[in-house]
Image (tube, grey):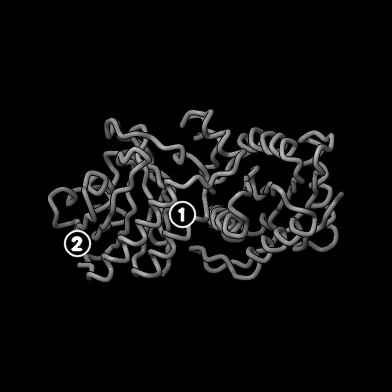
Amino acid sequence: MNDTKLTRTIASTATIKLANFPGLDLVYTPLEERFERLTRLARRSLGVPVAGVALVSEGKQWLKSIAGWNVSEVPADFGLCQWAIAADGLHVIPDMSADPRTSSHPFVVGHPRFRFYAGYPLVDHNKLAVGAFCVLDVKPRNPSAAEQRCILDLAALTQQEILADHLTTAQTALVSKLSVARREAMIDPLTRLWNRRGAGVLLKAALENADQNRQTLGIIVLDLDNFKRVNDTYGHQAGDELLRKVGARLVSALREQDLTFRLGGDEFLMVIANADQRSVQQIAERVRRAITDEPVPTRSGALAASASLGVTLRAPGERVTVEELLDRADQALMRSKADGRNRVRVTA
């Protein structure tokens, strides 16, 4: 199903706040494959255009994962999960245009013109409601018993992930010390990866963690090949869509403990903890194939993409600054480009 028909950036313009819901450390953290795979699975198994994991914090519903709709957050009073969050179980609205609670909702009367909603509340360790797992359609639906069971199963898996401690040590240290507002400033709004500011903090933390545990640290830098040609040929909207979907592919190709950043433009950084040179090279090659093996679907059509990658490793205890480490990775990236692009090169 084409997920580009429902894409639009939503501005947080409303002033009414959903009061007194607790926050989560998951709010304003980057894409994680463990949530992305659940929303992808929901779309495929239920045949719905949109599936999401919505969390409530500070007057917003923030989408930890959203498949099929290019939205990262909405004001709480615009959010579609408030009824599910307040429910004791699965909450279904078969036709939102016919329900008095939602018939005049901006997302029902206007783009994307949702009709069907089903959601199940998610709770924190204190059993307090913090969000909902939800699926939506632009057509009215009466889900069968089997479909309702599927939603409940996926919501239960999502709940397990929310209560699990899967964040890396570096991310945990950052999340536990910073407010939601500070974390928000470290997230790239386009790709929903950590941004350059986040890289400055997290890379330093990763180095400290590697020293404490006497582990090797791998650095991968990546540039998309001929990205300017995409913008020139198809426009910046297609370029942005390509960047966003490439970012999601990077997350899918890496391990859960690895870190992914968008440094700006078409430049990405990955930090690989506790892996030897062979393993880091294999990870880098897996990342390259994730971009090249299948064209990237966009509203301008499926676009072929490739990337050049540079890799370097920091040995345990090696005296090297963050800047020197990144410079070494950049040197490897330059070799990759000089050797013909669409390949991985390593600099010691």
Q: Residue furthest right?
A: 348
Q: Residues within 10 Å of mark 1 (few under 14, many from 20)?
A: some
Observer-side mark, 2 or 1, equals 1
Specify whether 46 is left or right of 164. Answer: left
Secondary structure found at label 2:
loop
Q: Dot 1 lies on which element? A: helix
Q: Is residue 230 or residue 68 the one in the foreground?
A: 68
Image position of 54 with respect to 13: above or below: below
Q: Which mark is residue 94?
A: 2
Task: Estimate the spatial distance between the alpha carbons at disc 2 and disc 1, rounded to whole Å.
Answer: 25 Å
Type of amino acid at the residue the image marks with label 2? Pro
Residue 231 image-quadrant placement = bottom right
Q: Is residue 344 above or below residue 75?
A: below
Q: Are marks 2 and 1 in contact (CB under 8 Å)?
A: no
In this rendering, position of residue 101 left or right of residue 254: left
- Badge 2 crowding class, 10 Å Cα cut-off, few under 14, some 14 to 19, many 20 or more, is some
Tell me the tag on residue 35: 1
Q: Position of residue 322 (x, y in %)?
A: 76, 35
What residue type is disc 1 on? Phe
Q: Is residue 329 visible?
A: yes
Q: Quadrant of residue 202?
A: top right
Residue 179 horizontal/vertical position (percent): 48, 28
Question: Does 94 sit left or right of 28 as displayed?
Answer: left
Look at 55% across and 56% down and name the residue there: 248
The mark that comes first in sequence, 2 or 1, is 1
Say which quadrant the N terminus sits in: bottom left
